[in-house]
Image (cartoon, grey):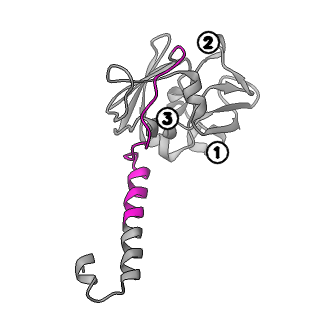
Amino acid sequence: MTLTLAAAFLPARTLRAAAFLAAYLALASAALMGLARPAWALEQPKQRPVLSISGNIQQTNRDGRALFDMAMLERLPQTTFTTMTPWEKEPITFSGPLLRDVLAAVGAQGKELRAVALNDYRVAIPAEDATTYRVIVATRIGGQPISVRAKGPLFIVYPFDSDRKLQSSAYYERSIWQLVALEVQ
């Protein structure tokens, strides 16, 4: 029965509640699928850009790309976790925005992210990793900004200790340090 036919049988209050619920569920579904666009326009970077996102994105701020300076990334909600990595002998604390929040900020729609590092290392990351795991674009290690020498300024990091499946070369290879660009495919 459509909402129009239901009007003849249900009280107005119930119809308003049903319409509100339907709209809410549609918006929530779009957000979960990465299709929701931010309510704000992507601002221009005020400092030197540290990340360029291109490809299938809805929000841009320069030449069809979305450029982020460090301050823009740090204004996004921040996540912190401590995890072992294959590169260090002790657990490390990483902080930064969730990759899914960065992708939502640009209205990314795609199945794959092609990540590029300063040294031109390239890796393909399934876009679903951003929603399946708490992957972050780390801007800090141990609470301090990450220098280029220490794998920064940006480092995609998976919470390796949260799921044994993540403790494999496939996920270690996707953890790209010195990240400078993402292309959404």
Task: Please give the label number shown on residue 148.
Answer: 2
The quarter of the picture where the N terminus appears is bottom left
How much space separates mark 3 and mark 2, taking CA atoms? 21 Å
How much space separates mark 2 and mark 1, taking CA atoms? 27 Å
Relative placement, left or right, of 162 versus 113 is right
Depth check: 148 or 7 in front?
7
The quarter of the picture where the C terminus appears is top left
31 inside magenta stretch: yes
Secondary structure of residue under mark 1: helix
Residue bounds of the magenta highlight: 23-48
Q: Label 3 is placed on what type of residue?
A: Val
Task: Please give the label number shown on residue 102.
Answer: 3
Depth check: 89 or 24 in front?
24
Viewer can see residue 2: no
x and y, in percent, of residue 123 in the image: 43, 24
Dot placed on the residue nearer the N-terminal end, 2 or 1: 2
Secondary structure of residue under mark 3: helix
Viewer can see residue 52: yes
x and y, in percent, of residue 172 in the image: 55, 29
Query: Residue at horizontal 66%, vertical 29%?
Result: 85
Query: Mark 2 Cα within 10 Å, few/some/many (few <14, many 20+)?
Result: few
Nearest to viewer (mark 2 / mark 1): 2
Secondary structure of residue under mark 2: helix
Q: Label 1 is placed on what type of residue?
A: Ser
Task: Please give the label number shown on residue 162.
Answer: 1
Dot placed on the residue nearer the N-terminal end, 3 or 2: 3
Assess whether mark 1 and mark 2 are in contact (beta carbons under 8 angstroms).
no
